Amino acid sequence: MTNTQSEKNRWLIALSAVLIHLSIGSVYAYSVYQNPLRDSLGWEISDVTMAFTVAIVFLAISAAFLGRYVEKHGPRLSGLAAAALFGLGTLGAGVAVEVGSYPMFIGTYGVLSGIGIGLGYIAPISTLVEWFPDRRGMATGLAVMGFGAGALITGPVANTIMQYAGISTAFFALGVGYTLLMVAGASYLKKPPEGWVPEGMDESEIDDATKGVTVSTDLEQLTAREALKTPRYYLVWLMLFINISAGIMLLSVASPMTQAITGANAATAASIVGVIGVFNGGGRIAWASASDYLGRTATYGVFFAIQIAAFLLMPRITNVLLFASLLFLIITCYGGGFACLPAYLGDLFGTKELGAIHGYTLTAWGLAGVAGPMLVARIVEATGSYETSFYIVSVALLVGLLCTVLLRRRINSVKQSQGSKHTSPTTSD
């Protein structure tokens, strides 16, 4: 028997997730600290950058290994733990700046905050999928859009505070602000009650009303251990790795690359870089919402097809507006890949242990964060040009496109073995 009543409003659940992701997404604004830290403390740029690298590495590690913690303790406690870790890491970074301790800065901003980011990233996602079985892509897209847009808020706020009150004060003020926002968001998070389904949802789409989240469009209901034994999990992992590597490669060199290929001046290139955040965040909600109608496999196929064409064209384009347009289009695919992932994993493996499965899959993010920037850096050092890197990435994207074809076949094979009971476009593609 289904139940449409709940003490919680699912749209406020979504807002709670956005508050958490807006806070931890501030890591993308880290570059605003680089010059002030170098000028005031004498740290080298490479040393300052290391804190960001460490944070991303620990983000990936914690997302992979704390997924089971989220499943066991629930989204509220997990979100509060993430708030404590990220808030203390940011506050600790302020103390490290105050006393001029580089190791402490790495330990607080890099390690402690990084763990908080990873835990905060996955904490609300599986819960959102359960609250929005009818709009999985849109719901997770909203939250992940918050992560992509976090830098748009933190960047100017941190810069203003540093100008008037100093670097350590910026970390103190933002640490308190992040903690309050994340605590507010985590405190409202809760899984839907037993038997709950969204009001107005077609009951033919409900597969198991005792949970209220297991719908007929789910291919299977698997544990994380069971999911890791399927070929389709590794196809999804490889697709994510390729999509992130392509986007993060461009993000790492967006300004100098734009200047080298189009002849744009530094100010124009900087303006283009500033607008990237809008397309990163906007692409997450737009593509994730579209995937509810196009189907997740088809959406990833579109990502790869668009990027293959764009990467092949960009080395030949000298018009800065056209070049920037293709760059922005690729970045929407980069953000969209993150946003569609939780819903896709729910489609393929169900919601039984979605948090753990999502965490394991995000290891692709950590590896891609190293592979993409290193690839372009090595090629430019060896050839003096960005052109070869575009062509190499195009080949990788073609592999990604082939993965979507193979994954579609795997999905159809599983359906046939189950008697072809799933008919939704979400998994029929």
Image: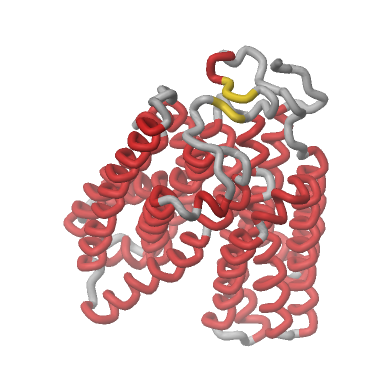
Say which residue appears at 44% left-offset and 46% top-offset: 337
Decide: is 155 above or below 31: above
User: Nearest the camera: 294 or 286?
Assistant: 294
In-front residue for pair 307/429: 429
Q: Can residue 32 be seen by looking at this rendering?
A: no
What count of labels does the image hold? Answer: 0
Identified at 49% across, 45% down, the residue is: 341
* Residue 66, x across and y down, in percent: 67, 59
Location of residue 63 with respect to 105 vertically, above or below: above
Identify the image quadrant of residue 143: top right
Please report the residue visible at 64 percent of the width from the left and 77 percent of the height from the top.
37
Q: Position of residue 110 (x, y in %)?
A: 65, 72
Up/down of 96 relative to 143, above or below: below
Left or right of 339? Residue 355 is: right
Which residue extends farthest left?
316
Foreground residue among 392 and 169: 392
Q: Position of residue 109 (x, y in %)?
A: 69, 71
Quadrant where the C terminus is found in the figure: top left
Position in image of residue 294 (x %, y %): 38, 28
Give 352 or 105, whichever is nearer the viewer: 352
Q: How is the image coloured?
A: secondary structure
Q: Note whether residue 64 is visible.
A: yes
**Image quadrant occupied by the N terminus:** top right
User: In the drawing, does residue 406 fall left or right of residue 202?
Assistant: left
Q: Residue at x 61, y 35 (%)?
A: 129
